[in-house]
Image (cartoon, rainbow, N blue to C red):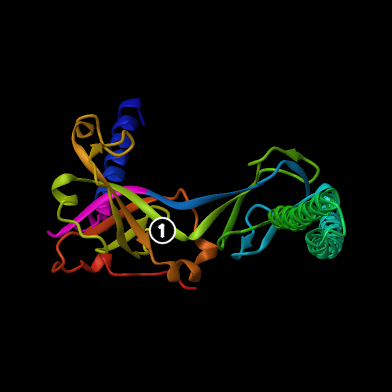
Amino acid sequence: MNTKSRKWILVAALLLIAAAAGIAWWRLRPAPLPPGFAVGNGRIEATQIDIATKLPGRIKEVMVSEGDFVEAGQVVARMDTQVLEAELRQAQAQVNQARNAVETAKAVVAQRESELTFAQNTLKRSEDLVEKGFISPQKLDADRTAMLTAKAGLVAARSQVVQAQSAIEAAQATAQRIDADLDDSVLKAPRAGRVQYRLSEPGEVLPAGGKIVSMLDLSDVYMTVFLPETTAGRLAIGAPARIVLDLAPQYVIPAKVSFVAAEAQFTPKTVETATERQKLVFRVKAQIDPVLLRKYRTRVKAGLPGVAYVQVNPSAQWPPNLEIKLPPE
């Protein structure tokens, strides 16, 4: 067989392959979208939560690994709290000391009240005796001065009681603050989700706000698409939507429109061609039902590309190829 014949055979084979591919595409091509619907491409996204320290300190232990599922309130890490525990003991001792000071100040008040009563009685007797001429006016002045001194001493003693009580409140507030810092040193997951990154390890010293774990909130998963203003203007919050992932085109995931941007923007470069980027579009979120997400949480992965279909006209009927089809549990 000569070279020319071989070339013709190769060309014929390539033509047959192209024809077969064309027939396969024609049979498997998606059905055209009926009126009343809009479509856009995007990626699965989930709310990311960074669990960080409130206070600077050393990490004592991290109790989760990347990929672990955590529940709301589950402890994910602990900080070293030796210094805080010592400060708490000091604050508690200050509370006891202030309470003792209050009792001492109250005893002084009782003493000053007794002294004032004695001085008042003495002054009264002196006033009677001066009128009768039994004592000199100088003695009356001395007794009056003693009474005024006793009254001032009582006022000062009562002020000491108030100061001691304020010291108790200040020490108790310090103890409560340290208790709150101890609670904040036990880092908990604010929501249920999956650990995405373990950012720090035991023994590391972190500043305030240092990140330890990054997790995904699997109850808040959505796909963001960009629709033209003529479509977004007619789109209602809560409108039904369908999501089809490139990885599993045989499944159709139910969703609903949870957000439509209030302002238009230029189409992102990753969405359309250069000419389409000159047009204004609105950002739209297609939210997946949290109940469904909990059911399939082991399969939820952020970043997967796909397509979202939204129902613009409430009376439009979903085509058969977009009927809900979920994978087995």
Crowding near pointer 1: few (<14 within 10 Å), some, many (20+)? Answer: few
In the depicted view, which residue is nearer to us: 267 or 177? 177
Rendered location of residue 133, percent (x, y): 83, 58
- Judge left or right: residue 117 versus residue 64: right
Residue at 83% x, 54% y is 143
In reply to whether residue 266 is colored magenta, the answer given is: no
* Residue that badge 1 annotates: 248
Task: Check the picture and name the quadrant holding the N terminus.
Answer: top left
Rendered location of residue 241, percent (x, y): 28, 62
Residue at 16% x, 66% y is 314
Magenta-tinted stretch = 23-42
In the depicted view, which residue is nearer to us: 281 or 142? 142
Residue placed furthest toward the bottom? 329
Rendered location of residue 12, percent (x, y): 28, 39
Q: Which quadrant of the figure has residue 96? A: bottom right
Residue 33 shows in the view: no
Residue 321 shows in the view: yes
Rendered location of residue 87, percent (x, y): 82, 50
Numbered label tally: 1
Residue placed furthest toward the front? 133
Residue at 62% x, 62% y is 70
Residue placed furthest toward the top? 3
Residue at 76% x, 42% y is 57
Q: Amino acid at mark 1?
A: Ala
Up/down of 176 relative to 265, above or below: below
